[in-house]
Image: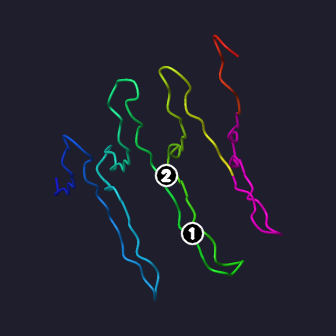
Amino acid sequence: MSGSIDLTVGRAVTGKTGDISLTIGDDDSADGGDIKLSAGDTSFYGAEAGFVTIKAGDATNSVENGGVGGAIHMIAGDSYGANNETDVGGDISFVAGAGAAASGGNIEFTTGYSQKTTSGYISFQTPNAVNKPGHSGGMSYVTGNATSGTTGGQEYRTGSVTDGV
């Protein structure tokens, strides 16, 4: 095994624990710097390549009003330029891995469950156009083509209810 890097902020008995912040400085004459998180590759037979896990904190106090679990925010960069064609905001892309022989990786969005009330919801939205003649963004749900076999299906359904509306 090669070496590891472990960044840890100690546990606080009272008050808030410290933060860890990774920041790249601003640049006024070239592209801004990148932050890259990469897990290790493997060429060993049957082994699994490294994982990247990003997990927000749990609110572990189990009494009433015990707290709110931490959120994960992924926010792409804004563009403040004035060119209507080229000065666009940054993208967020989710791309699963390809499989050379078996199926490709999946992308799953699953909300949190609730032991007492309502599970979380999933919302896909494009915001309103602000200025005239602006256009609101579109949405596309497309399954891939197949040269033999079947294409992927699409399913939209609601869950069942045992006691309620």
Residue 32 in the figure: left or right of residue 159? left
Where 76 falls versus 139 (above or below)? Answer: below
- Residue 160 x/y as whole percent: 66, 18
- Residue 114 x/y as whole percent: 49, 25
- Residue 110 x/y as whole percent: 53, 36
> What number is the disc on residue 97?
2
Find the magenta span and give its range.
126-155
> What number is the disc on residue 4?
none
Question: Residue 153: within the magenta?
Answer: yes
Q: Give the quarter of the image for residue 27.
A: bottom left
Q: Secondary structure at mark 2?
A: loop
Prevailing SS of the magenta stretch: loop
Q: Give the quarter of the image for residue 82.
A: bottom right
The residue lying at 51 percent from left, 52 percent from top is 98
- Residue 55 x/y as whole percent: 37, 45
The residue lying at 75 percent from left, 62 percent from top is 129
Check disc 1 and report the residue beneath it.
78
Camera-side residue: 57 or 49?
A: 57
